[in-house]
Image: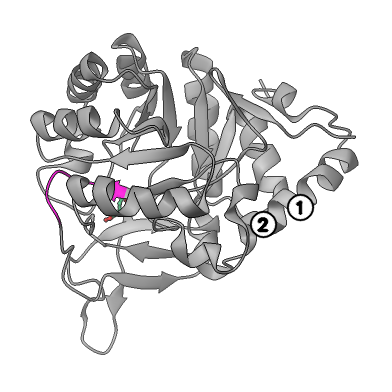
């Protein structure tokens, strides 16, 4: 019998599979397709202090082996997430969830963090300093080690729950940012968010996306994500949730060998809404094929 349980710090997950923020909403739509309690956990749509309508459309562009999104952190705001979404989520998902939060100032990160930290359903707070689709927020905090450190320090001062910082790949040296977050007390790291990209419409000769650019995700970015998880694993001691282009059991195993303790699946949910279910069901047999008896033991095995 293969053991596919994994740990994120003290939290034991029944398996490493976690749908990534922004690709699974608050779980409702997917709960109509399968029992989402089979998931290790899931990270719900990024929440900001105020309600956000998001960016103008078009905000999605298809690409070979992936897609570009420029959603712009559309969400109902932290108060509605707490008063409306979390109570509904509780009815369909009976495990701790990952709360993804974003901000346009350090005060906003702190505000959201302080509020969500009080919610019993939340297992981990994932602090997004890497959204490429908003100005003066998101990625602006995650591309400089000093800024990422400042956000980490501020949210750690108010959070009792573990804080994972979600890092951007749109940087020259992700390791220095990871280390800066660890030094300020981050309990873990999530990486990578999407890669800044664009497409141009040949008929209009203008960018496809109204915001011109957006975050590229999907299978094409897996090698970049693996490289970054591998590099960060060498440099920090805190757990890593690996993500970026994962869409199969083999990708999950590769991500864990690079250094991930658990794995998020993003764009693949939009191609096949059953992908997480299928991976969880197939994972024991695929582990067996590669002579893996205990999945958590392979984290960092490629080093
Ligand atoms: C978005 O809402 O624009 C995507 C969020 C992200 O990439 O962090």
Whether 40 is drawn above or below 301: the answer is below
Taking the magenta stretch, the answer to whether it contains residue 50 is: yes
The picture quadrant where one finds residue 1 is: top right
Whether 191 is drawn above or below 259: the answer is below
Taking the magenta stretch, the answer to whether it contains residue 300 is: no
Q: Of residues 285 and 58, which is closer to you in this image? A: 285
The picture quadrant where one finds residue 178 is: top left
Q: Could you tell me which secondary element the residue under label 2 belongs to?
A: helix
Check if mark 2's residue and mark 1's residue have beta carbons within 8 Å: yes
Position of residue 168 measured from the top left corner of the image (x, y, whole percent): 33, 38
Read off the residue under disc 2: 277
Q: In this view, does 56 lie to the left or right of 300?
A: left
Read off the residue under disc 1: 281
Q: Residue at x 24, y 30 (%)?
A: 113
Q: In this view, does 303 lie to the left or right of 28?
A: right
Q: Which residue is drawn at 66% across and 28% down?
A: 6
Whether 297 is drawn above or below 246: the answer is above
Q: Which residue is drawn at 85% across and 29% down?
A: 293
Q: Main secondary structure of the magenta part?
A: loop
* Quadrant into which the C terminus falls: top right
Q: What residue range appears in magenta?
A: 46-51
Q: Of residues 86 and 188, which is closer to you in this image? A: 86
Position of residue 226 measured from the top left corner of the image (x, y, whole percent): 55, 38
């Amino acid at each position: 019998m293969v053991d596919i349980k994994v740990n994120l710090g003290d939290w034991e997950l029944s398996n490493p599979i976690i749908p990534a923020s922004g690709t699974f909403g608050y779980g409702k739509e997917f709960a109509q397709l399968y029992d989402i309690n089979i998931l290790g956990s899931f990270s719900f749509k990024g929440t900001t202090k105020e309600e956000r309508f998001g960016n103008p459309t078009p905000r999605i562009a298809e690409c070979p082996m992936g897609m570009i999104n420029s959603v712009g952190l559309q969400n109902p705001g932290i108060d509605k997430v707490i008063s409306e979404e979390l109570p509904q989520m509780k009815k369909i998902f009976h495990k701790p969830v990952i709360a993804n939060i974003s901000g346009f100032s350090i005060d906003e990160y702190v505000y959201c963090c302080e509020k969500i930290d009080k919610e019993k359903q939340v297992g981990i707070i994932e602090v997004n300093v890497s959204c490429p689709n908003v100005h003066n927020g998101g990625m602006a905090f995650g591309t400089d080690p000093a800024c990422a450190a400042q956000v980490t320090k501020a949210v750690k001062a108010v959070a009792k729950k573990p804080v994972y910082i979600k890092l951007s790949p749109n940087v020259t040296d992700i390791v220095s940012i990871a280390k800066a977050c660890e030094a300020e007390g981050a309990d873990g790291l999530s990486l990578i968010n999407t890669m800044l990209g664009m497409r141009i419409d040949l008929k209009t000769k203008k960018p496809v996306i109204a915001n011109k650019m957006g975050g590229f995700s999907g299978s094409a970015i897996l090698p970049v994500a693996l490289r970054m998880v591998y590099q960060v694993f060498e440099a920090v001691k805190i757990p890593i949730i690996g993500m970026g282009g994962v869409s199969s059991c083999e990708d999950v195993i590769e991500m864990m060998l690079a250094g991930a303790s658990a794995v998020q699946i993003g764009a693949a949910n939009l191609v096949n809404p059953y992908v997480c279910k299928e991976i969880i069901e197939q994972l024991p047999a695929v582990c067996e094929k590669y002579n893996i008896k205990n999945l958590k033991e392979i984290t960092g095995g490629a080093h």
